[in-house]
Amino acid sequence: MRRYTMYNQRSHCPPWIQWEKYVEGRKIFIDDFIEYNGYAYTTVFDRRVIHIVNVNGDDIRYEVSTNYRDNDFIVVEEYADILNKEKELGWWYTSQSDVHVFLSEKTRVMVMLPITPTVKKIYEEIKSKCRVRYNSMWHKGGILKKASYRIIPLTKFNGLYTVYKKSKVIS
Protein backbone atom coordinates (compact mmCIF):
# COMPACT_ATOMS: atom_id res chain seq x y z
CA MET A 1 0.00 0.00 0.00
CA ARG A 2 1.33 3.45 -0.93
CA ARG A 3 1.50 6.14 1.73
CA TYR A 4 0.95 9.80 0.88
CA THR A 5 1.39 13.07 2.72
CA MET A 6 -0.93 15.95 1.78
CA TYR A 7 0.31 19.54 1.88
CA ASN A 8 -2.10 22.47 1.70
CA GLN A 9 -0.28 25.56 0.41
CA ARG A 10 -1.91 28.72 1.77
CA SER A 11 0.71 31.48 1.58
CA HIS A 12 -1.60 34.00 -0.06
CA CYS A 13 -5.34 33.76 -0.32
CA PRO A 14 -6.85 36.88 -1.95
CA PRO A 15 -10.60 37.48 -1.77
CA TRP A 16 -11.23 36.08 -5.26
CA ILE A 17 -9.96 32.73 -4.07
CA GLN A 18 -12.66 31.03 -2.08
CA TRP A 19 -10.95 28.87 0.52
CA GLU A 20 -14.04 26.67 0.66
CA LYS A 21 -13.41 25.70 -2.97
CA TYR A 22 -9.98 24.38 -2.07
CA VAL A 23 -11.40 22.51 0.91
CA GLU A 24 -14.05 20.94 -1.33
CA GLY A 25 -11.47 20.22 -4.04
CA ARG A 26 -9.21 18.56 -1.49
CA LYS A 27 -12.15 16.46 -0.26
CA ILE A 28 -13.03 15.36 -3.80
CA PHE A 29 -9.39 14.50 -4.52
CA ILE A 30 -9.07 12.49 -1.32
CA ASP A 31 -12.42 10.70 -1.76
CA ASP A 32 -12.24 10.00 -5.49
CA PHE A 33 -8.53 9.41 -6.00
CA ILE A 34 -6.58 8.74 -2.81
CA GLU A 35 -9.10 6.77 -0.73
CA TYR A 36 -10.89 5.19 -3.69
CA ASN A 37 -7.57 3.70 -4.84
CA GLY A 38 -6.68 2.59 -1.31
CA TYR A 39 -3.72 4.92 -0.75
CA ALA A 40 -2.84 5.91 2.82
CA TYR A 41 -2.06 9.59 3.39
CA THR A 42 -1.53 12.25 6.02
CA THR A 43 -2.47 15.95 5.80
CA VAL A 44 -0.03 18.80 6.41
CA PHE A 45 -1.10 22.47 6.07
CA ASP A 46 1.43 25.05 4.94
CA ARG A 47 0.24 27.05 1.90
CA ARG A 48 -2.71 27.71 -0.47
CA VAL A 49 -2.85 24.79 -2.93
CA ILE A 50 -2.95 21.08 -2.15
CA HIS A 51 0.07 18.78 -2.45
CA ILE A 52 0.06 15.01 -2.07
CA VAL A 53 3.52 13.55 -1.51
CA ASN A 54 4.16 9.83 -1.91
CA VAL A 55 6.47 8.92 0.96
CA ASN A 56 6.85 5.33 -0.19
CA GLY A 57 9.98 5.93 -2.25
CA ASP A 58 8.43 7.43 -5.40
CA ASP A 59 8.04 10.95 -3.96
CA ILE A 60 5.21 11.98 -6.31
CA ARG A 61 3.52 15.24 -5.36
CA TYR A 62 0.08 16.31 -6.61
CA GLU A 63 -1.09 19.91 -6.55
CA VAL A 64 -4.82 20.49 -7.02
CA SER A 65 -6.60 23.48 -8.60
CA THR A 66 -10.39 23.68 -8.63
CA ASN A 67 -10.61 25.79 -11.78
CA TYR A 68 -11.29 23.11 -14.42
CA ARG A 69 -14.61 23.69 -16.20
CA ASP A 70 -14.97 20.45 -18.25
CA ASN A 71 -14.17 22.38 -21.41
CA ASP A 72 -10.79 21.04 -22.59
CA PHE A 73 -8.91 24.11 -21.31
CA ILE A 74 -6.69 24.58 -18.27
CA VAL A 75 -5.96 27.80 -16.38
CA VAL A 76 -2.29 28.55 -15.70
CA GLU A 77 -1.34 31.27 -13.20
CA GLU A 78 1.83 32.94 -14.47
CA TYR A 79 2.11 35.73 -11.94
CA ALA A 80 0.62 35.90 -8.47
CA ASP A 81 1.29 39.66 -8.49
CA ILE A 82 2.01 41.86 -11.51
CA LEU A 83 1.67 45.32 -9.94
CA ASN A 84 4.89 45.57 -7.93
CA LYS A 85 8.38 46.18 -9.35
CA GLU A 86 9.44 42.61 -8.77
CA LYS A 87 6.62 40.50 -10.16
CA GLU A 88 5.68 37.55 -7.96
CA LEU A 89 5.70 34.38 -10.05
CA GLY A 90 2.56 32.23 -10.03
CA TRP A 91 2.26 28.54 -9.27
CA TRP A 92 3.23 27.51 -12.83
CA TYR A 93 6.78 28.65 -12.06
CA THR A 94 6.94 28.12 -8.30
CA SER A 95 5.09 24.85 -7.75
CA GLN A 96 7.02 21.98 -6.21
CA SER A 97 4.54 19.41 -7.53
CA ASP A 98 5.25 16.61 -9.96
CA VAL A 99 1.64 16.42 -11.19
CA HIS A 100 -0.87 19.26 -11.38
CA VAL A 101 -4.50 18.20 -11.02
CA PHE A 102 -7.12 20.47 -12.61
CA LEU A 103 -10.34 19.44 -10.89
CA SER A 104 -13.97 20.12 -11.79
CA GLU A 105 -16.11 20.31 -8.67
CA LYS A 106 -19.24 19.99 -10.81
CA THR A 107 -18.40 16.64 -12.46
CA ARG A 108 -15.49 15.51 -10.23
CA VAL A 109 -13.37 15.02 -13.36
CA MET A 110 -9.61 15.49 -12.86
CA VAL A 111 -7.09 16.39 -15.54
CA MET A 112 -3.70 15.18 -14.30
CA LEU A 113 -0.79 16.89 -16.05
CA PRO A 114 2.75 15.85 -15.06
CA ILE A 115 4.88 18.97 -14.74
CA THR A 116 7.92 17.75 -16.65
CA PRO A 117 10.60 19.67 -18.58
CA THR A 118 8.74 18.69 -21.79
CA VAL A 119 5.46 20.18 -20.51
CA LYS A 120 7.26 23.35 -19.34
CA LYS A 121 8.95 23.68 -22.76
CA ILE A 122 5.65 23.27 -24.62
CA TYR A 123 4.06 25.92 -22.41
CA GLU A 124 6.89 28.39 -23.07
CA GLU A 125 6.53 27.76 -26.83
CA ILE A 126 2.75 28.26 -26.97
CA LYS A 127 1.99 30.80 -24.23
CA SER A 128 2.36 33.80 -26.55
CA LYS A 129 -0.56 32.42 -28.60
CA CYS A 130 -2.83 32.46 -25.53
CA ARG A 131 -4.06 35.83 -24.29
CA VAL A 132 -2.94 37.05 -20.85
CA ARG A 133 -5.90 37.60 -18.52
CA TYR A 134 -6.04 39.36 -15.18
CA ASN A 135 -7.83 38.74 -11.89
CA SER A 136 -9.35 41.51 -9.82
CA MET A 137 -7.02 43.51 -7.61
CA TRP A 138 -6.85 42.80 -3.88
CA HIS A 139 -4.93 44.03 -0.85
CA LYS A 140 -2.47 41.90 1.07
CA GLY A 141 -0.70 43.50 4.00
CA GLY A 142 -1.65 46.97 2.73
CA ILE A 143 -0.14 46.28 -0.71
CA LEU A 144 -2.29 46.24 -3.83
CA LYS A 145 -1.88 43.01 -5.84
CA LYS A 146 -3.16 41.56 -9.11
CA ALA A 147 -2.55 38.13 -10.68
CA SER A 148 -2.27 37.15 -14.34
CA TYR A 149 -3.15 33.85 -16.00
CA ARG A 150 -3.61 32.20 -19.38
CA ILE A 151 -6.24 29.75 -20.57
CA ILE A 152 -4.47 26.95 -22.44
CA PRO A 153 -6.10 24.34 -24.71
CA LEU A 154 -5.46 20.81 -23.45
CA THR A 155 -4.77 19.77 -27.06
CA LYS A 156 -1.37 21.48 -26.69
CA PHE A 157 -0.44 18.70 -24.24
CA ASN A 158 -1.91 15.72 -26.15
CA GLY A 159 -0.48 12.44 -24.91
CA LEU A 160 0.99 14.04 -21.80
CA TYR A 161 -2.03 14.21 -19.45
CA THR A 162 -4.60 11.81 -18.04
CA VAL A 163 -8.29 12.54 -17.50
CA TYR A 164 -9.49 10.72 -14.38
CA LYS A 165 -12.91 10.19 -12.84
CA LYS A 166 -13.63 7.87 -9.93
CA SER A 167 -13.95 4.27 -11.13
CA LYS A 168 -12.43 4.93 -14.55
CA VAL A 169 -9.63 6.58 -16.45
CA ILE A 170 -11.24 8.54 -19.29
CA SER A 171 -8.16 9.11 -21.45
Image (cartoon, grey):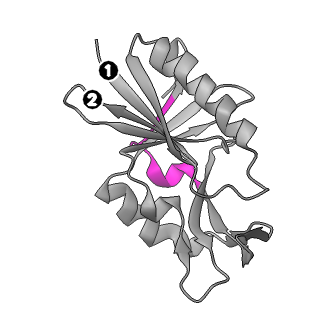
Secondary structure, mark 1, is strand
Identify which residue, 128 or 76, lies in the foreground: 76
Residue 37's quadrant in the figure?
top left
Q: Residue at x 53, y 37 (%)?
A: 111
| Quarter location, residue 21 | top right
Label number found at residue 55: 2
Residue 70 visible in rendering: no
**Does residue 3 lie above or below 74 as drawn?**
above
Per the rendered image, the range of residues in magenta is 153-163
* Residue 77, position as x, y percentages in the image: 59, 62
Q: Quadrant of the N terminus?
A: top left
The numbered mark at residue 3 is: 1
Q: Most extreme residue toward the front, as rendered? A: 141
Near mark 2 (Cα within 10 A), the count class, few <14, some 14-19 or many ≥20, is some
Determine if the magenta segment contains residue 157: yes
Amino acid type at circle 2 is: Val
Q: How many marks?
A: 2
Q: Are marks 1 and 2 in contact (CB under 8 Å)?
A: yes
Left or right of 93 in this view: 55? left
